[in-house]
Image: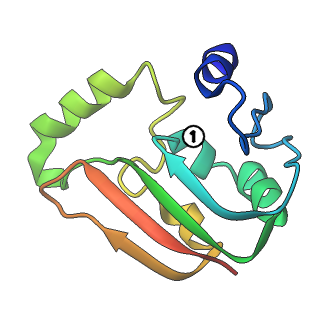
Amino acid sequence: MLALAAGRIGARPPVDLICATAEEVTLPHAADAVLFSYTHDLINSRPALENLFRQVRPGARIAATSTKLYARWLAPANWYLRATHRGYITNFEHFEAPWALLATYLDDFRLDTSPFTQHYVATGRVK
């Protein structure tokens, strides 16, 4: 994936490509914002969030989007979600509210979702 990204950006700055886990990455400079897109396991990892948020500017903007379970009464749809996501998620802990840990690190936390959708968008600012 890193080689593919490097080929796509070419010599266009300012892009820093880094191959590291979120728990161990060292960013080249403090970030103003972080986007978590379909990163269920990462936003449920306290060591990853703590490492990343130590390296952002105070009040950095955060956005996360991914999938979640439907309301419990839509059980057939949840079975389908689990079946189609099993190759991409280490485990389904917190899949009913994947943003819960992330929210504890943020001020001005906002969540946009509903029982009738599998998607969510969570936003806030690092405390």
Residue sitting nearer the eye, 2 or 93 = 2
In the depicted structure, whether residue 27 falls above or below residue 107: above
Quadrant of the image for the C terminus? bottom right
Residue type at numbered disc 1: Asp
Question: Residue 29's image quarter?
Answer: bottom right
Could you tell whether 20 is left or right of 118 in the image? Answer: right
Position of the N terminus, as image quadrant, is top right
What is the secondary structure assignment of the residue under circle 1? Answer: helix
Residue beneath the point at 78% across and 72% down: 57
* Residue 76 vertical position relative to residue 102 in the rendered view, above or below: above
**Residue matched to label 1:** 41
Q: Which residue is drawn at 77% across and 39% down?
A: 16
Estimate how packed mark 1 is, as few (under 14), some (14 to 19) or many (20 or more) residues with alpha carbons within 10 Å. Answer: some
Position in image of residue 22 (x %, y %): 75, 42
In the foreground, 108 or 68 = 108
Q: Position of residue 33 (x, y in %)?
A: 63, 64
Judge from the rendering whether residue 54 lies leftward or rightward of residue 113; answer left or right.
Answer: right
Residue 8: x %, y % from top left: 58, 22
Q: Residue at x 44, y 38 (%)?
A: 92
Q: In this view, does 102 lie to the left or right of 24?
A: left
